Image (spheres, grey):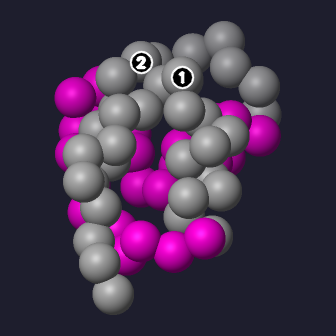
Amino acid sequence: MAKIKIKQTKSIIAKTPNQVKNMKALGLKKIGQVIEKEDSPHIRGMIRKVEHMVEVIE
C-alpha cells in the first residue's frame, strides 16, 4: 500500500475530546511532528476529522 505523511500544524489545546483522541491515535503529539502511515480509508477518515490541525504530504 501507499504511504502518506501527516504533519501536525496546530495545537490540540482547547479542542474537542474526539479531536484530541484522533490526534493521539494518529500518533501526533507536537506541532511540527511528521509521521508516516499506510494510506487507508480508516486513516483518511481520522485525518478528515482533524483536517484543520494537520497537513497531508503525499
Q: Position of residue 22 (x, y in %)?
A: 63, 48
Q: Which quadrant of the view contains residue 12?
A: top right
Q: Are marks 1 and 2 in contact (CB under 8 Å)?
A: yes
Q: Which residue is mark 2?
A: 10
| Residue at image location 54% in from the left, 23% down from the top | 52
Magenta stretch, residue numbers: 18-41
| Nearest to N terminus: mark 1 or mark 2 | 2
In whole angstroms, how far apart are the C-alphas of marks 1 and 2?
8 Å
Quadrant where the C terminus sits is bottom left
Q: Which residue is mark 1?
A: 52
Number of residues whose C-alpha sits closer than 10 Å to that of mark 2, classed few (under 14), some (14–19) or many (20 or more): some
Quadrant where the N terminus sits is bottom left
Is residue 12 shown above or below 46? above
Residue 33 in the magenta stretch? The answer is: yes
Residue 24 in the magenta stretch? The answer is: yes
Q: Which quadrant of the view contains residue 36?
A: bottom left
In the image, is 21 to the left or to the right of 7?
right
Element type where label 2 sits in the image:
loop
Q: Amino acid at mark 1?
A: His
**Residue nearest the viewer, comparing 48 with 15:** 48
